[in-house]
Image (tube, rainbow, N blue to C red):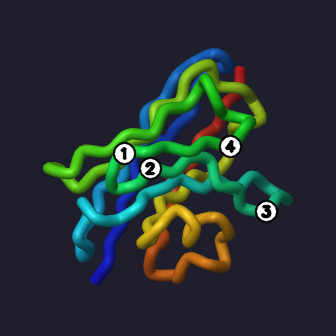
């Protein structure tokens, strides 16, 4: 079955950095679009970044210039490098996968088995 296992979350001070990883199994990783959603308390889930099988990337305006998504097909792993972190980046971050970027645009368009369990990021001094 599909498994998406995130790691790398934690507590970091404002201005700091974290790198999230998501190891995938049960899918043909190299042909999948991968992405990261996040959800803060009381807010809806937000698509943070996505990367297609060809390496094209998309970012939410709130993270452009600070976050970088990348993938290693040999390791079936997608990464999210987060720099210059702000308190408003505090959230649970979820790894997701879909056939195409258009299938990642809303949480409802992603089947439940294509979500990881989430990793918590807290940005606080």
Residue 117 in view in this figure: no
Q: Is residue 62 above or below residue 51?
A: above
68 to the left or right of 47 = left
Q: Which residue is mark 1?
A: 55
Inter-mark Cα distance, 4 to 3: 14 Å
Q: Position of residue 47 (x, y in %)?
A: 64, 55
Q: Which residue is mark 2?
A: 51
* Mark 4: few/some/many CA within 10 Å (<14, 14-19, 20+): few
* Mark 3: few/some/many CA within 10 Å (<14, 14-19, 20+): few
Inter-mark Cα distance, 2 to 3: 21 Å
Q: Which residue is mark 3?
A: 44
Q: Residue at x 49, y 43 (%)?
A: 57
Q: Secondary structure at mark 1?
A: loop
Residue 101 in view in this figure: yes
Q: Nearer the viewer, mark 1 or mark 4?
A: 1
Q: Which residue is mark 4?
A: 60
Inter-mark Cα distance, 2 to 4: 12 Å
Which mark is first along the chain, 4 or 2? 2
Q: Quadrant of the N terminus?
A: bottom left
Labels 1 & 4 near each other (Cβ < 8 A): no
């Amino acid at each position: 079955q599909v498994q998406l296992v995130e790691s790398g979350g934690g507590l970091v001070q404002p201005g700091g950095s974290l790198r999230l990883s998501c190891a995938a199994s049960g899918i043909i990783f190299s042909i999948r679009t991968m992405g990261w959603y996040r959800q803060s308390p009381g807010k809806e889930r937000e698509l943070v970044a996505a990367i297609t099988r060809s390496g094209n990337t998309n970012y939410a305006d709130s993270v452009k210039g600070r976050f970088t998504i990348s993938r290693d097909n040999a390791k079936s792993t997608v990464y999210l490098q987060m720099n210059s972190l702000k308190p408003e980046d505090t959230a649970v971050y979820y790894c997701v996968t879909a056939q195409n970027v258009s299938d990642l645009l809303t949480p409802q368009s992603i089947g439940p088995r294509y979500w990881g369990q989430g990793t918590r990021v807290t940005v606080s001094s």
